Image (cartoon, grey):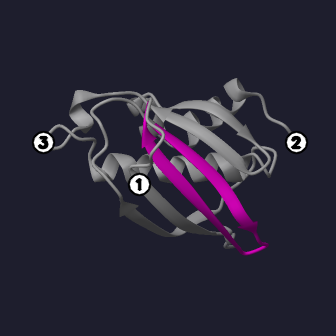
Amino acid sequence: MSIPVAEMQRLVHEGVPLARAWGVEVLQAAGGTATLRLPHHEDLLRPGGTVSGPALMGLADVAMWAALLSLTGGKDESLTANLAITFLRPPAPRAVIAEARVIKKGRTLSYGEVLLRSEGEAAPCAHVTTSWASAVRRA
């Protein structure tokens, strides 16, 4: 079920148009993991020059969806049920890397985590835990 990176990026940009608008790049996605990059944008900074919390949360959410897509052959309609973020340090005003991994893929609920870090730094700036509910089709 391996999906080429270019195809995964297309899926992410079509599924989440905001990811396209922000220029989010899929660097890797396979086997329940995904690495995405949010390029530096002045309009995503908050006062003080750090990347804003909403931008970090959006990147984490998209990264986890990409990790889930990597397990489902690119067909995943599950929805975020919960996303909790702990900000560990202010991110530098540059690109942000998100490393997502699915911890448990269930039939109705999946659970994962995402580490966010400023590009070029080893220490994370935020840790995210998230759960996703399988979409229920209504007649």
The residue that mark 1 highlights is: 126
**Residue 107 in the image: above or below residue 113:** below
Numbered label attached to residue 66: none
The residue that mark 2 highlights is: 1
Crowding at mark 1 (Cα within 10 Å: few <14, some 14-19, many 20+): many
Q: Is residue 71 magenta?
A: no
Mark before the other along the chain sequence, 1 or 2: 2
| Mark 3: amino acid | Gly
- Most extreme residue toward the front is 122
- Give the residue displayed 79% in from the left and 34% down from the top: 3
- Give the residue displayed 46% in from the left and 47% down from the top: 116
Secondary structure mostly taken by the magenta-highlighted segment of the chain: strand
Mark before the other along the chain sequence, 1 or 3: 3
| Mark 2: amino acid | Met
Q: Camera-side residue: 36 or 135?
A: 36
Residue interval drawn in magenta: 97-119
Residue 94 rendering spot, x and y as whole percentages: 33, 29
